[in-house]
Image (cartoon, rainbow, N blue to C red):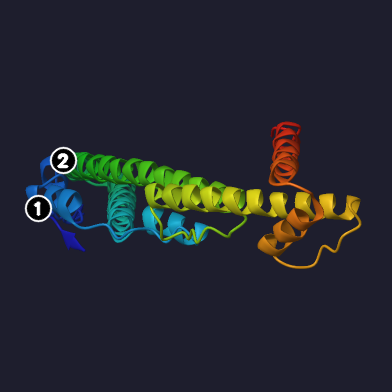
Amino acid sequence: MAIDAQGNPIYQAPTVVETSVPRPTAQTVYSAANIDQATSAPVAAPNLSDPYGIYDQFMNSADIKAARAKVAEGQGLINNSNHALRTTTRALENQNENAMGGTGASVNLIGRQVGRARQLTADELAGLGETQNANLSYLNSLQADAQNRYGIAQQERSQLQDLIRQTGGKAGISFTDSFESALQKADKYSTEKAKEDKKDAYKDALKTKLVELGLKTKGNTKELEKRLRKSVSSTKEYDKKIKDIELKIKQKELNKPYY
């Protein structure tokens, strides 16, 4: 420890290091390069068969992960700056206490050093805070956009699930279909199924009529019609029976409950 001419100890205050802190702003975060990447980068179509994968694709994208890392880095810089201020202030205040028995000049010098350290840190924290606010704003905008995209994908998945359920999974609809193509497949399936149902209903009605006449019911529709025709005395009578059958089918359709 140094001694002055009067024999008093001279206390040396710790040197306050002024660091140059880069201060990225909103202009830096929302740079032309970042905006161009966010708006023009192709987004892969989501795999709608994997609900967890859909969430991960949108809410944990590379852009969002990078933005989260930037926020974490910014918070780390803020924490480090606060820690450095506490360490420096504690050291200076300790020297200030030790200097109480020394000259007023020494006490004043250390006091000024404490104030200077606090001011430098305040300036540094202001810059870091601006950067962190910009980082958080950018992350929030990415997450909001991802949430919207995720909602749209979930809606598409739900629509496809409904069509698959309505068609019993027999229309060839998959989660790789667009909603429009799935609708076309569902409509085609429904039309074909209605035709087949009508044919089956007609054949069943023919069998019922043949049972009433005590005739065999084995064979295809043409064979059943031929058997019925042979059982009547005239074409007119046959046509009447066919019309009766068709009428019963229509009545049965009308009596079906509507869901």
Q: Residue 90 in the image: x percent, y percent?
A: 34, 50
Q: What residue sits 84% from the left and 51% below the top?
A: 208
**Quarter of the rendering occupied by the C terminus:** top right
Q: Residue 188 in the image: x percent, y percent?
A: 47, 51
Say whether residue 189 is visible. Answer: yes
Q: How many marks?
A: 2
Say whether residue 114 is visible. Answer: no
Q: In whole angstroms, how far apart are the C-alphas of marks 1 and 2? A: 13 Å
Relative side of 200 to 34, left or right:
right
Q: Nearer the viewer, residue 5 or 123?
A: 123
Residue 127 occupies quadrant: top left
Q: Dot 2: what SS?
A: helix
What residue sits right under mark 2 in the picture? 26
Instruction: Give the numbered dot on residue 33.
Output: 1
Q: Nearer the viewer, residue 146 or 202?
A: 202
Relative side of 198 to 61, left or right:
right
